[in-house]
């Protein structure tokens, strides 16, 4: 009976850490979308509740996998109904895991509770962003706005 209670308690603790990692991953993506300059350093731990977590952020361009004939047809009929072309989209991946300070690991591994969250973002879809996010982008200057529109901010992060 004692081993059963211990196993249940251990599983509950792991579930709490997984939930914390998922919530923190969501918050970090929102923070990145609002103002990537305000992101914490990946070299430091991020506190969440009584625990501390580590994270990795990756931003890449979504590669188009459209058939050449379909892509050509989409380009020939430009409408607002077509939506964004896949090459303009960004893929943001945040992986969060329990840090060694809270009984986890310094690096990503399968032993520490971890969660990954992926979000595909259209950098031009400003109408879907909260007003504060748009204000941060405008206040950051025309160079940053053009960099996001042209996708050069993604290329710099990939290097």
Image (spheres, grey):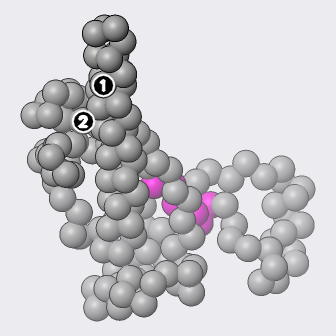
Nearest the camera: 53 or 11? 11
Q: At 73% from the left edge and 73% from the top edge, which residue is drawn?
A: 83
Pointer 2 with pointer 1, Cβ within 8 A: no
Q: How many marks?
A: 2
Q: Is residue 84 magenta?
A: no
- Please report whichever mark, 2 or 1, sits nearer to the chain's N-terminal start: 1
Residue 133: percent from left, percent from top: 38, 82
Foreground pick, 137 / 78: 137
Whether residue 156 is visible: no
Q: Where does label 1 land, which residue? A: 9
Residue 111 in the image, given as x and y percentages of width and height: 31, 20
Report the magenta residues as a range.
Answer: 87-92
Up-down relation of residue 135 to residue 78 (above or below): below
Label 2's element? Answer: strand
Disc 2 versus disc 1: distance between alpha carbons? Answer: 18 Å
Task: Judge left or right: residue 7 versus residue 67.
Answer: left
Q: Is residue 143 above or below residue 82?
A: below
Question: Which label belongs to residue 122?
Answer: none
Percent across and percent down for residue 140 are: 28, 85
The residue sitting at 81% across, 79% down in the picture is 81
Of residues 14 and 116, the one nearer the viewer is: 14
Which mark identifies residue 98? 2
Q: Residues within 10 Å of mark 2 (few under 14, many from 20)?
A: many
């Amino acid at each position: 009976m004692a081993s059963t209670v211990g196993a249940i308690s251990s599983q509950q603790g792991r579930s709490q850490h997984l939930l914390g990692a998922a919530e923190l991953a969501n918050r970090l993506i929102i923070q990145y979308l609002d103002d990537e300059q305000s992101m914490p350093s990946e070299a430091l731990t991020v506190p969440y509740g009584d625990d501390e977590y580590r994270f990795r952020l990756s931003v890449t361009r979504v590669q188009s996998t459209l058939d050449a004939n379909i892509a050509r047809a989409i380009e020939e009929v430009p409408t607002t109904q077509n939506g964004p072309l896949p090459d303009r989209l960004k893929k943001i991946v945040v992986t969060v895991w329990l840090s060694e300070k809270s009984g986890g690991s310094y690096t990503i591994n399968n032993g520490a509770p971890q969660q990954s969250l992926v979000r595909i973002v259209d950098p031009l879809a400003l109408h879907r962003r909260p007003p504060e996010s748009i204000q941060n982008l405008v206040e950051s200057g025309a160079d940053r706005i053009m960099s996001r529109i042209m996708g050069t901010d993604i290329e710099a992060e990939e290097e």
